[in-house]
Image: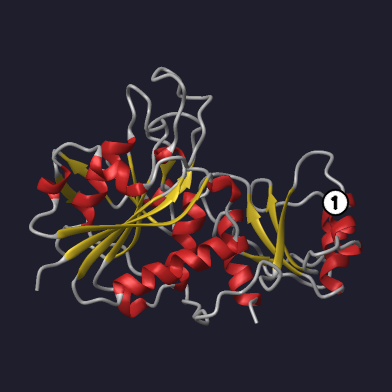
Amino acid sequence: MQQRVVFLGTGGTIAGQAESSQDNVSYQAAQIEVGKLLEAIPGLRGQLRGALLHSEQVFQFNSKDLNPCHWQQLQGRVVHYLSQADVRGIVITHGTDTAEETAYFLARTVPEALLCSKPVVITCAMRPATSAHSDGPQNMVDALCVATTEGAHGVLLLCSATVHSALRVQKVHLYRLDAFDSGEAGPVGVVEEGQFRLFGAWPELLETVTHRSLSPQAPTKQDWPRVEIVTSHAGANGASVRAMCAHTAQGDSPLRGIVVAGTGNGDIHHDLAQALNDAQAQGVRVIRTSRCATGSVVLAQPNDTDPKLFEASPLSAVKARIALMLELLD
């Protein structure tokens, strides 16, 4: 049986267009269909290692505008293709702004039985497709290399020849081509001249994080539990938290959870903490993370003299939000 590699397009800068080939800023993201991007890469089919190439445009958006319904739609297509015996792996073209969120969502929701033997490689670009020095084509070639590497599995993100795990990856730079980092854990490996070099071992499937099964019928936007993110800082107060708890705009879901990105080791300004305590008393789940780029929150056990410390998460705020949404999903 001849194997296939599937490219799923979702938009982003990698599919962006600008009026000038020198313009890497004032472009329109999500303009070029993934099949057209593939056709424009010289010698791409020579990198398939005997596999066939298949592409599908799942949706076409600037990734800053994605919502959980888009994630659910993409997850359904990933499950569809991974379930087919002839599919060797999947490459997803995506915008950089929320690629780490999509990666984490897929790693949490695609069945482990499918991810344990096949890779899903998300790739992206920091310059549009029309740029004279676009990084998208090389990222797509490198992602194809990883997707066809023996033993590759799980959800990965590739940018600038560096491969990251879905759990650890974060976007850390606004415009540098190598815009992602995996913090203290480091990357999974790198692509060097068409060959993937693994650093140690393939990452476990989200380590101790459990998977969340999703029903085949996609929830509507209102069905997804509403979880917001707030940040603690000098002079922070609880006004925004109190407003979120007191008011739900027409068409919005009621507030179910709040993730607070604290300073340092998850520290929260006293005034903000009081508002969060009040929200928790009203039934809103509160999860504490840190706004620091690396490290995990380590909290002492609360005692009779301490205020509630809230549940701590080792994830970044955006990933902790996804984890809480999945936990609250009915």
Q: Describe residue 41's horizontal placement relative to residue 113 as left or right.
A: left
35, above or below 193, in the image: below
Q: Residues within 10 Å of mark 1 (few under 14, many from 20)?
A: few
Residue closer to the observer: 182 or 294: 182
Residue 226 position by quadrant: bottom right
Q: Which residue is mark 1?
A: 240
Q: Amino acid at mark 1?
A: Ser
Residue closer to the observer: 262 or 25: 25
Residue closer to the observer: 285 or 40: 40
Residue 139 position by quadrant: top left
What is the x, y in percent for residue 245? 87, 63
64, above or below 250, in the image: above
Please tell me which residue is depicted at 59% across the width and 73% down the height of the picture: 326
Q: Describe residue 97's horizontal placement relative to residue 80 as left or right.
A: right
Secondary structure category for the residue under label 1? helix
What is the x, y in percent for residue 145? 19, 50
Quadrant position of the C terminus in the picture: bottom right
43, above or below 154, in the image: above
